[in-house]
Image: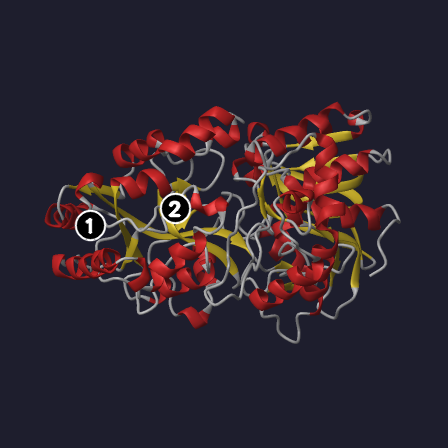
Amino acid sequence: MRFDLAIIGGGLAGISAAIELLDQGLKIAIIDRDSEQNFGGLAMKSLGGMTLVDTPVQRLNRIHDSPEIALRDWHSCAQFSADDQWPRRWAELYVNRSVDDIYNWLKPRGIKFFPVPHWVERGEFGDGNSLPRYHIIWGTGRHLMLTLINELKDHVNSRNITYLFDHKVESLLINNQSICGLRGTQEKNGQAFEVEAAIVLVASGGINGDIERVKQEWDQTWGAPPEHILNGAHQYADGTLHDAVKHIDGKVTHLHQMWNYAAGIHHPQPNIPGEGLSLIPPKSALWLDATGKRFGPLPLVTGFDTHNICKRIARDRYGYSWQLMNWKIALKEIAVSGAEANTAFRDRRIIQLARDILLGNRKLLEYLVNECEDVVTGNSLEELVEKMNALNASSQTVGRGTVEVENIKQAVQHYDAQIELGEEFHNDDQLRRIAQVRHWRGDRSRTCKFEKILAKKSMPLVAFREFIVSRKSMGGIQTDLESRVLSNSGQVIPGLYAAGEAAGFGGGGINGLKSLEGTFISNCILNARMAVRSITGQALTP
């Protein structure tokens, strides 16, 4: 099979590139390991959050952002090393072009954002987003991907594109130090195939869908990886193309840097083995270790430093945690990341969304309580602890650690006593953080105002058993600002490009140590567009 250009991966990066490349009349192939019914990749299931800088949405909310402020925040979070030349340059490019190349590219396609940006990853000590800049797509990632897929299929040059689904690319072909094609096998029958193309764009995702590889690449400064890690990535994100790029002397960096989440629960209806749902944890819940002790002395509170929460739980000898709350807290604050659980956002139902914000998402909470193996309820601490330990005893996936009722009593009584004193005497860091986040209306609507755990009117008690859930690879194939793949000696490999998660979202690790959040699906678009500019001879001047 011969094409002008081959795109490996039918996710957001590959589709974004294909749309613009069809304008040039090129003969293109999209080669995807998954089936046609799953066209669109992991972005199809995402919440659709993007960190964007100095947008009309921010200005409407009187948020005075700028590339300079955003870059300062980025560097504070990323903690780039002296060797991170390309990640650093990609970060600078991103903050300066997120509006022109992402926001303004989506707007004419009818993609709209929720009118209030969320304020996530503030940093435990201000070393994160200093302003709200997390924009959520109205319709989630599902609406985004369906919009782009329809545009691709309705393109005036759609006859120039060939889709090869259920095809696994295993190696890249090179001739005279230039890319000349690729080789692989068909998933259904194991038959070999080969594609000739002078240009190949790798947009195949990361490594986090292979839990064993996640453990192999685990950051050694965190100690040994937890015994049980849930899978929240694409099942085919296994690093096959990273290895193929390495085989032809392409540089792959920072695979130990990952963006995982700490509040994973087993999916009640898994599509892949070990599939996890990633909770957006309640800020008013107490985060406890496997014995019922509260993490401290600095308590774990979501929305400030996801990376540090994962690290602290992973370093704990049990490698998993519990969150304790009452029904009122769970009803108001519990959420699950992704399109599947956010039906009001996904289906763009404004009345349902308003109701869920005002009254809580009862349907979601009842679903989790009734269907998820990691959720227990009780009318007293004693009853709850008994059920927590019974859950561990009956579980085939985890059972180490016994919850001690005295540990939980001590944590709850101390916390509730602080609330009873009144806000002017609060000396608990979790309560201080709750007070802080409630100043921003995007958080106030879904954060309780100093809710005691044992408040009688708010029973029953609810406990979630939570695991690390594997999500995104922040390292990857190293690329220059034109998305061209670089060799280990720093030279461009002619004809080879990489975009999206495969490229560590730019440069082999644009986020450095940790992300400002929302820098993932947006970078799939930016990386892809930079690749297209280079391929068509319109690359920006670095």
Q: Which mark is residue 283?
A: none
Residue 161 lies, in percent from the top left, at 76, 30
Q: Is residue 86 left or right of residue 49?
A: right
Tell me, yes or no, whether the two marked residues, 2 and 1, touch with CB atoms within 8 Å: no
Q: Quadrant of residue 426?
A: bottom left
Residue drawn at (74%, 23%) of the image: 154
Q: Amino acid at mark 2?
A: Thr
Residue drawn at (49%, 45%) of the image: 441
Residue 398 lies, in percent from the top left, at 25, 52
Badge 2: how crowded within 10 Å, few (<14), some, or many (20+)? many
Residue 330 lies, in percent from the top left, at 31, 41
Q: Is residue 134 visible in this depiction of the protein?
A: yes
In the depicted structure, whether residue 122 falls above or below residue 389: below
Q: Is residue 275 left or right of residue 526?
A: left
Q: Quadrant of residue 490?
A: bottom right
Which residue carries the number 2 mark? Answer: 447
Which residue carries the number 1 mark? Answer: 392
